[in-house]
């Protein structure tokens, strides 16, 4: 049983922790690892690295923490409620720990990095705290705990990309996978904790990215999602053995190289930053059929003054210019966004500007959040979190309502059309149905048929839709 799901959520702490389970490795040590992940896709991809490191040590994985020897929780700090969810889960693990004092409980990821040794003081049941750049140290840290000590490594690195570690694919469908192409973030959006929890931005060697994508394709995977906090600033400089020279690779060039592996493999990517997305990237998407026409381009706010306070380094006009470029260069491109309601000092008029921006773009999808002050960020230090909760909630609900209307409208445009999808497997709700995504990332559900297999491309006639899903039948 393997149950990491690919969602179109790039960074949603609302995803409940999902347990990752994989087949047992060849050499076992009889010990079991349970790992649960929260937060963005990058965190889920990291859990695959962690599992790979521990499998190498002879561990096997389990989906039941009650039978585990080691329980890891890979955490997210992006909003306060994300951290609260982790703390609640830790208290459940605490009950188990009291029953089985030998159980090792580890906190990984962004909360570990943010709270460091404070975690060991605050949560007595936690044995080991490991930041996102220190996973290679896990075997040694586990050893330390076995010797009766608490263990911690939260060093951030300027180089670590885990390029040589082959992630254990925990995604059950065998069709879609994530590939981390960079780590960290050098932007300083004033609301955001990520630069503090993930460290400096660094790009991964393109050779290792291409080798990973090729390997996935050889194993039957049909879709890869290239991951980074700001993929458009991907930049790698180094020696190229084949060309016997120094080469420089930017994101557009990387996209092209992955696309050239085979026309049969689809490429997605996330997240794009409005200040960095270039026309070169857009032309590359337009040029290759297998690079999906779907861009996640978070706007955060429609007001230039608020964007400035957020330190996003673009204005409303700049963002609109990027949207116009997408519409011109890739006419049928789906666009999604992240939006924050009630950032410090946001006025009613500025909130309206967010709503009019939504109408200008007509997003296919959006992740919407109430501003949550994060300790240590620029906003926490310099700005007052002065929008009352009920005002944030009301603005958020207006944003949500508008998005629902646009999502429904965008999906409705597909009704009556025949669309090509990549079949991912049985639908979540019923075994009688199959599901798959369109190029534009819309989920399509249709009655299964014996000849249909996961991983094949299929034409589906769209009969109707809900606000989240297209419903159809296999086209003749
Ligand atoms: N690197 C991505 C976003 C990563 S965080 C980008 O720049 O777009 C994912 C989303 O969480 C952000 O886009 C933002 O909308 C939201 N977010 C981040 N910090 C937040 C905070 N303090 N309060 C509310 N939402 C926040
Ligand atoms: Fe956070 Fe901004 Fe970096 Fe995105 S680009 S991770 S919002 S600091
Ligand atoms: Fe959360 Fe860290 Fe990702 S804070 S959104 S898990 S980078």
Image (cartoon, rainbow, N blue to C red):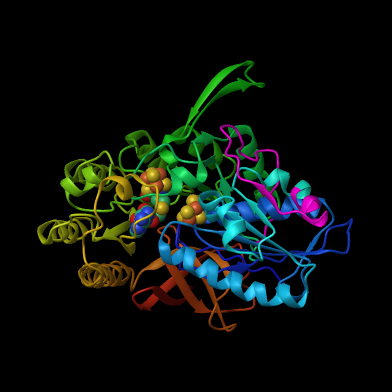
Of the 4 image quadrants, the one containing the N terminus is bottom right
Q: Position of residue 299 (x, y in %)?
A: 28, 51
Q: Position of residue 129 (x, y in %)?
A: 64, 53
Predominant secondary structure in magenta? loop
Decide: is 67 above or below 48: below
Q: Is residue 23 left or right of residue 341?
A: right
Q: Position of residue 229 (x, y in %)?
A: 45, 45
- On whether residue 376 falls in the magenta region, the answer is no
Q: Quadrant of residue 261?
A: top right
- On whether residue 164 falls in the magenta region, the answer is yes
Q: Is residue 183 left or right of residue 96?
A: left
- Residue at the (65%, 72%) spot, across then down: 93
The residue range painted magenta reads 141-170
Q: Quadrant of residue 334?
A: bottom left
Decide: is 93 above or below 241: below
The residue furthest left is 349
- Residue at the (30%, 60%) spot, across then down: 371
Q: Which of these two is toward me, 252 or 439?
A: 252
- Residue at the (40%, 58%) spot, across then down: 440
Q: Is residue 203 left or right of residue 230?
A: right
Decide: is 87 above or below 327: below
Q: Quadrant of residue 5?
A: bottom right
Q: Which of these two is toward me, 130 or 403?
A: 130
Asked if residue 336 can be seen in this view, the reply is no
Asked if residue 460 can be seen in this view, the reply is yes
């Amino acid at each position: 049983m393997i149950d990491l799901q690919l969602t179109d959520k790039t960074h949603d702490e609302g995803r409940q922790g999902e347990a990752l389970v994989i087949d047992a490795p060849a050499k076992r040590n009889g010990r079991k690892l349970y790992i649960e992940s929260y937060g963005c896709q990058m965190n889920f991809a990291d859990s695959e690295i962690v599992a790979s490191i521990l499998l190498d040590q002879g561990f096997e994985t389990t989906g039941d923490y009650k039978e585990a020897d080691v329980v890891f929780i890979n955490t997210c700090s992006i909003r306060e409620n994300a951290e609260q969810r982790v703390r609640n889960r830790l208290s459940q693990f605490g009950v188990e720990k009291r029953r089985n004092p030998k159980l090792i409980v580890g906190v990984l990821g962004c909360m570990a990095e943010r709270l460091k040794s404070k975690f060991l003081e605050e949560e007595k049941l936690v044995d080991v705290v490991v930041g996102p750049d220190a996973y290679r140290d896990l075997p040694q840290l586990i050893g330390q705990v076995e010797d009766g000590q608490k263990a911690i490594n939260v060093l951030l690195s300027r180089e670590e990309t885990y390029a040589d570690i082959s992630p254990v694919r925990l995604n059950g469908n065998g069709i879609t996978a994530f590939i981390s192409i960079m780590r960290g973030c050098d932007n300083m959006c004033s609301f955001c904790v990520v630069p503090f929890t993930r460290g400096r931005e660094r790009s991964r060697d393109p050779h290792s990215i291409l080798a990973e994508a090729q390997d996935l394709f050889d194993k039957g995977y049909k879709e890869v999602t290239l991951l980074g906090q700001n993929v458009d600033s991907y930049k790698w400089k180094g020696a190229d053995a084949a060309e016997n020279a120094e080469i420089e690779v930017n994101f557009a060039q990387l996209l092209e190289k992955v696309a050239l592996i085979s026309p049969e493999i689809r490429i997605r990517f996330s997240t794009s930053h409005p200040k960095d997305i270039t026309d070169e990237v857009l032309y590359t998407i337009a040029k290759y059929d297998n690079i999906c026409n779907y861009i996640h381009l978070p706007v955060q706010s429609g007001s230039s003054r608020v964007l400035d306070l957020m330190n996003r380094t673009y204005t409303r006009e700049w963002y609109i210019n990027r949207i116009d470029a997408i519409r011109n260069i890739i006419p049928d491109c789906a666009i999604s966004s992240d939006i924050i309601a009630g950032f410090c000092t946001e006025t009613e008029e500025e909130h309206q500007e967010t709503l009019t921006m939504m109408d200008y773009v007509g997003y296919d999808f959006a992740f919407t959040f109430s501003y949550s002050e994060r300790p240590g960020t620029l906003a926490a230090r310099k700005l007052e979190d002065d929008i009352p909760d009920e005002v944030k909630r009301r603005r958020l609900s207006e944003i949500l309502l508008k998005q629902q209307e646009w999502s429904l409208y965008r999906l409705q445009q597909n009704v009556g059309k025949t669309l090509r999808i990549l079949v991912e497997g049985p639908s979540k709700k019923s075994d009688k149905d199959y599901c798959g995504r369109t190029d534009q990332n819309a989920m399509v559900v249709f009655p299964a048929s014996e000849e249909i297999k996961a991983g094949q491309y299929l034409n589906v006639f769209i009969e109707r839709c809900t606000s989240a899903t297209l419903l159809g039948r296999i086209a003749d």
